[in-house]
Amino acid sequence: MKRVYGFLVTSYELRVTSYKLRCFLLSAFCVLLSAGAFAQKYDDKDVSKEVQGNRPLYFGVSVGPTIDWFAPTTKDFELVRERAKAGFIAGINIDVNVTKGRFLYFSTGLLVRYLQGELAFENRYTFNEFIGMDTSLVIPTVRTYKASYLVIPTGIKFRTPPSRGCVFVGKLGLYHGFKLGGDRFDNFSFSNEDPEFFITTKRVKNNHAALFAETGYAGIGFEYIFKSNIRVFLNTDYGCQFNYFSSTTKSNVVPDARFRTIVHSAHIVFGVLF
């Protein structure tokens, strides 16, 4: 298959990606342990009035852009990741304290996430409607997937004691996503050498994405305390969705070959806590 839409994902590149992912998760885990150890040295007798600024319960609203990219894991046929795509995540957040020192919180809420991505592969198209006879061709194509999810996060969040109105945060957990809807469409041409025409198919329902998606996340953040203990915050998170496609999504070129990919995401989230 001649490729003009992206670069091939080789086994070496997949190993490098896996190594970088392990390093990131290890670093995030160390940050969380450090934050927890720093906060844990305070108990009720030693906690200052400033430390008590961490309340037992927080409600918040948040919104922010995401950058998402597919990382194909199928081995049955050539499935290649194309460009990273922009999305967003927004919703309400709830943090409930679970320790005496008010440094460890159970974090949940209700979010909406919009996710899109592109994959390149060979696909079989039938053109009998155009030329009046049954004709099918296998053509390199780039498919764009779009989906929106209702997300329930469950995780833990570490908060350092406030210092001059500043609080540092580390978090770790899971996003439980339920697909709300979405669509998909293809782009292809009949010639790879300076094609005269590019064809875009009509948008159809994205029935390839699984109805349920599980995503692990880790991140760090910063909160600033205003009067009345209202806080504004900024978080930088990494997410890894463990699978995107349903079990029924298969190639129409290679028999019984399933689409398989994980989804990497980078989130920058702004919000307010009350």
Image (cartoon, grey):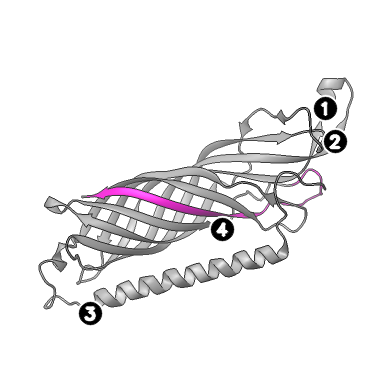
- Residue found at x 72% / y 61%: 10
What's the residue type where badge 3 is placed? Answer: Lys
Q: Is residue 11 above or below residue 26?
A: above
> Mark 4 = which residue?
242
| Mark with earlier residue (1, 2) | 1
**Dots 4 and 3: beta carbons under 8 Å?**
no
> Mark 2 = which residue?
137
**Image location (x, y in percent) of residue 94:** 29, 53
Q: Is residue 21 visible?
A: yes
| Mark with earlier residue (2, 3) | 3
- Residue found at x 81% / y 33%: 190
Residue 41: numbered disc: 3
Which residue is outermost to the front? Answer: 194
Q: Which residues are magenta?
A: 251-273
Q: Is residue 112 visible?
A: no
Is the residue marked by circle 3 packed among few (<14), some (14-19), or many (20+) residues within 10 Å?
few
What's the residue type where badge 2 is placed? Answer: Leu
